[in-house]
Image (spheres, rainbow, N blue to C red):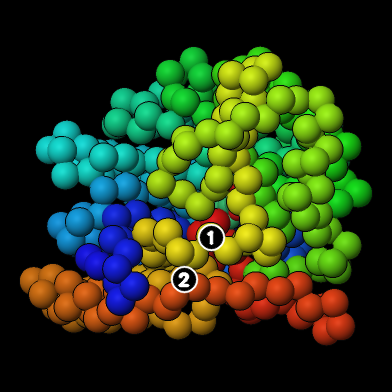
Amino acid sequence: MIDPFGRHITYLRVSVTDRCDFRCVYCMAEDMTFLPKAEVLTLEELDRLCTAFVSLGVRKLRITGGEPLVRKNVMQLFENLGRHLRTGVLDELTLTTNGSQLARYAKDLARVGVRRINVSLDTLDLDKFREITRWGDLTKVLGGIEAARDAGLAIKINVVALKGVNEDELDDMVRWCGERGCDMTLIETMPLGDITGDRTDQYLPLSIARARLERHWTLQDSDHRTGGPARYVRVAETGRHLGFITPLTHNFCESCNRVRLTCTGTLYMCLGQEDAADLRAPLREDPTDASVLEAIHEAISRKPKGHDFIIDRRSKRPALARHMSVTGG
Ligand code: SAM
Ligand code: SF4
């Protein structure tokens, strides 16, 4: 699949549920309304769609959400998708998780062929963790991370940089990740979906975070890539990679190789644009997959050049109405 700007689409991110056991302040309102179950694709339908994308050249699948590991029987999907790793048509099957269920699933994930995972962790402080996630339990997440390490999974820790919340902890987090052999990625808050509160209060430009880290750490240029949007440096003192995802201060669209599928079968060609294609109708109407393959081709042919997020200080409206938990982060 090659889009109109010559970019090869080889990476599909799949949100398997919009539900979550946390309510992170930058991601969700506390009283979220979730989709009726009937609108959500079954695990078999998700497998069919992923398989269609793999047949069209997708080499990397990331399962996300919402919290992917709270979806009932989600291991069945991982197990089924693992077959594409064994036949060699897929290079990587991975997931992004809040870590709350990892203690339970880490071994199974490793068994079906998952090699590395992203775990979101914004703070190492019990109280702050509760403040950020509203419902989360840090002890459980840390236990999950240990279980994943024991199962041999490589772990990248995703940290959303939050002004006045965890900005004073970033040095500690770099050290903590270094001690555990984990890479780390810093993410800027993105204006997606209505949340409770004011986003301009949370926004910390990563240029500032980076300059502060450079007081204590030697950040060396690195050409490390993981197929995602992060730009990496190597932290000389720990030997680990540190990534920066900066949608607001730096345009990462020119090398975009990915599209996103929601749990209702809507394909978003860009995280920051409204345009989307419905794949659920062709999937359900045509058991042969011909219609769905055609709909995917048609969608890729209108993948936009890029996005232009801004955090509007006057209206304080989100740039896009849909939450990250719908499109999958
Ligand atoms: N629940 C899983 C988790 O938290 O890792 C997967 C889904 S979550 C939507 C994926 C990533 O998006 C997380 O790292 C989260 O911190 C990030 N995220 C959510 N809302 C965001 C926002 N408004 N701006 C930036 N990152 C956001
Ligand atoms: Fe849930 Fe992940 Fe959103 Fe937090 S960031 S509320 S864990 S989906």
Percent coordinates x, y for residue 258 in the rendering:
39, 60
Which mark sits nearer the N-terminus, 1 or 2?
1
Is the residue marked 2 within 8 Å of ligand 1, measured from its CB? no
Res 56 label? none
Q: Quadrant of residue 23?
A: bottom right
In the rendered image, which residue does mark 2 sit on?
Answer: 270
Q: For the N terminus, which image quadrant?
A: bottom left
How packed mark 1 is, by other alpha carbons closer than 10 Å (few <14, some 14-19, many 20 or more), is: some
Q: Quadrant of residue 257?
A: bottom left
Helix or strand or loop: what does disc 1 sit on? loop
Question: Which residue is located at x 26 percent, y 48 percent?
Answer: 59
The answer to whether residue 154 is left or right of residue 231 is left
Percent coordinates x, y for residue 284 in the rendering:
22, 76
In the rendered image, which residue does mark 1 sit on?
Answer: 252
Q: Nearer the viewer, residue 137 or 212?
A: 212
Q: Nearer the viewer, residue 305 or 81?
A: 305
Q: Is residue 225 above or below residue 20?
A: above
Percent coordinates x, y for residue 11 in the rendering:
34, 54
Is the residue marked 1 within 8 Å of ligand 1, measured from its CB? no
Res. 25 visible in picture? no
Q: CA distance from mark 1 to mark 2?
A: 11 Å
